[in-house]
Structure formats: C-alpha cells, structure tokens
C-alpha cells in the first residue's frame, strides 16, 4: 500500500526518538527528502558514535530496524528510508571515493589488480561508481557476502 513519505517520516522519527531516549542519548532528528521517493532521517547531537558502530554496522542495523517498524506500522510498500548520524554516510562516501581514486591511480601506474577488503553492498556501490568515472580501470565484485569484495583491474587493451 502506498503511504505518504510524510506519514512514514513521522513513524520513523517516533521510533528513533524512542530508541535514542532509551539509550539515554541526546539527538535531534531532522527529516529531508533528497529524492522524490526517499526520506532521510539525520540524527545530530553529542556523543552519537555508539549509534554508528564499527564501519557503520550499528547505523545500518538501526536503519533496517527503522524501515521494519515503518513497514509494520503503516503497511507501506513505497518509498525509501535512509538513516544517518552526524553526516556519517556522506563523510564515509567521500573518504571511500578518495581512497578508491588513490587505489585506481596505483592500478593504472603498476598495471596490477588490487583486491579491496570485504565491504557492504552500499560501500561496494560507491567504489564501482567512483571507478566508472576513471579511465583505464574497471571493477568486479568477487566472493559471497559478508566476504564480498571489489577488485580494481587495469583495463586490458582488447576491451
């Protein structure tokens, strides 16, 4: 069933406010709509690192829980819900893109493929998208989750 993004945002904010309160943290939740079918809830406040966790693992779990709560309470089958804490996702994306460009330059220079560490699907997408804009290199994903990783390869002359 289609449910307005405004209604989904209200339910998501209530859930996040309750979660933060139970954890005795202080956070302000703001809602933006970066795309027509997407809402993003951003939590800002002091000492919110606990909500991010190692490499964003806790943040990803909170986002999944938020989506589940919204779907159960509203029966929504539309829209996309993103959760961020203190701009972590943007900072992570920027840092990962910078790292990817450095590795791609190394692959171009040496002609040797580079296998990156296992990463989430969202992080792999950032790597693939970044490399798509760089000539002379390409990417493939190898392995199975949770050990799936991106390989950056030099483009062979016959491709």
Image (cartoon, rainbow, N blue to C red):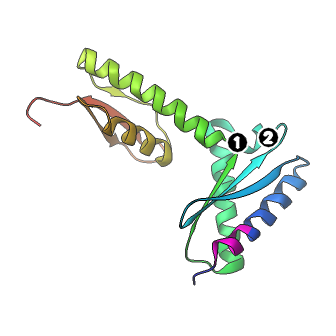
Task: Look at the picture and state if 95 lies above or below 56.
Answer: above
Q: Image quadrant for the N terminus?
A: bottom right
The picture places residue 96, in percent across and down from the top left corner, at 50, 32
The reply to whether dot 1 and dot 2 touch (C-beta < 8 Å) is: yes
Indicate left or right for 18 with 71 as reference.
right
Residue at 27% in and 15% down: 109
Q: Image quadrant for the C terminus?
A: top left
Residue 48 numbered tag? 2
Q: Residues within 10 Å of mark 1 (few under 14, many from 20)?
A: some
Residue at 32% in and 37% down: 133
Indicate left or right for 37 with 52 as reference.
left
The picture places residue 103, in percent across and down from the top left corner, at 38, 23
Q: Residue furthest top?
A: 110
Residue at 34% in and 41% down: 142
Indicate left or right for 120 with 82 as reference.
left
Task: Look at the picture and state if 157 lies above or below 108.
Answer: below
Q: Main secondary structure of the magenta part?
A: helix
Residue 11 part of the magenta-drawn span: no
| Residue, disc 1 | 52
Residue at 49% in and 42% down: 123
For the record, the magenta segment spans: 4-9
């Amino acid at each position: 069933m289609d449910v307005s993004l405004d209604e989904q945002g209200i339910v998501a904010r209530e859930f996040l406010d309750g979660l933060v309160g139970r954890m005795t943290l202080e956070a302000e939740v703001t809602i933006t709509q970066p795309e027509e079918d997407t809402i993003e809830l951003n939590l800002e406040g002091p000492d919110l690192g606990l909500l991010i966790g190692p490499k964003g693992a806790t943040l990803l779990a909170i986002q999944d829980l938020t989506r589940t709560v919204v779907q159960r309470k509203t029966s929504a089958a539309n829209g996309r819900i993103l959760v961020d804490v203190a701009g972590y996702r943007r900072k992570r994306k920027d840092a990962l893109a910078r790292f990817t460009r450095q590795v791609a330059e190394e692959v171009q220079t040496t002609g040797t493929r580079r296998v990156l560490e296992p990463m989430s699907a969202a992080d792999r997408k950032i790597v693939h998208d970044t490399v798509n804009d760089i000539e002379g290199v390409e990417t493939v994903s190898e392995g199975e989750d949770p050990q799936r990783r991106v390989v950056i390869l030099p483009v062979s002359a016959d491709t």
